[in-house]
Amino acid sequence: QCIPATKSSEPRLQTDPDADFDFMRIIALSVLACAARRVKFFQKAIDALGEAKSLCLAGGDTVQQHPLLIALTLLNLSAVLGDIDHDEQGLRWGLEALGLMYNIFSNVELPEMIQAYYLALACHNAALLDVKLGRWAEAQELVDEGIEFTK
């Protein structure tokens, strides 16, 4: 979908790993997904975020994208999956995003307000999915955790 804007058709550049702009493709796909979600084209959003997730996780154990880009992509995917009632799958990716954020913020210096925003957002997302699944205790724990970040 976003290949024409982020991938060269010139053979010399296609074989150059330094000319690979997967991060731009991930961002473009995420923007596409947000726009699709806004107008309730959920399948289009899922497709775009699925492709973005594949690009994020393409390296396997070798992380090739910025960890925060990966976490935000997974968080967006989680939210859209929740929109279409794929709550178990959404919760899986939402908790993965939350775990990545904890790891990122323990190793990367970012202002506390930014960390609190992302962590509270991820906690709220996971808590909402837990509520939809009837997991009240887990939801309450995540809500409390999210509130702690806003103090």
Image (cartoon, rainbow, N blue to C red):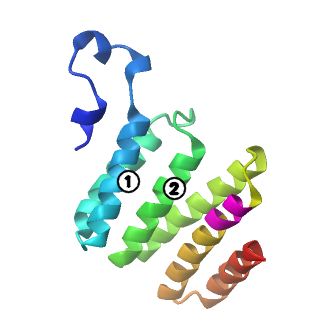
Q: Label 1's element? A: helix
In front of the other: 87 or 65? 65
Q: Residues within 10 Å of mark 2 (few under 14, many from 20)?
A: many
Q: Mark 2: which secondary structure?
A: helix
Mark 2 / mark 1, whichever is N-terminal: 1
Pointer 1: what residue?
A: 30
Dot 1, crowdedness within 10 Å: few (<14), some or many (≥20)? many
- Residue 63 location in percent, x, y? 56, 36
Q: Residue at x 37, y 74 (%)?
A: 86
Report whether 48 appears left or right of 126: left
Residue 38 point in image, percent of width and height: 30, 71
Q: Amino acid at mark 1?
A: Ser
* Start-end of magenta stretch: 113-118
Looking at the image, the residue that sits furthest to the top is: 12
Which quadrant, please, contains the C terminus?
bottom right
> Does 79 sit above or below residue 69?
below
What's under tag 2, amino acid-wise? Answer: Leu
Q: Is residue 109 above or below residue 131?
A: above
Q: Is residue 116 magenta?
A: yes
The residue positioned 40% from the left and 40% from the top of the image is 55
Q: State the image coordinates of residue 56 (x, y, percent, origin top left).
A: 46, 43
Query: Is 13 one of the magenta-colored residues?
Result: no
Name the side, left or right, on which 103 lies relative to 22: right
Please give the residue where the numbered disc 2 appears in the rendered image.
72
- CB-based contact (under 8 Å), mark 2 and mark 1: yes
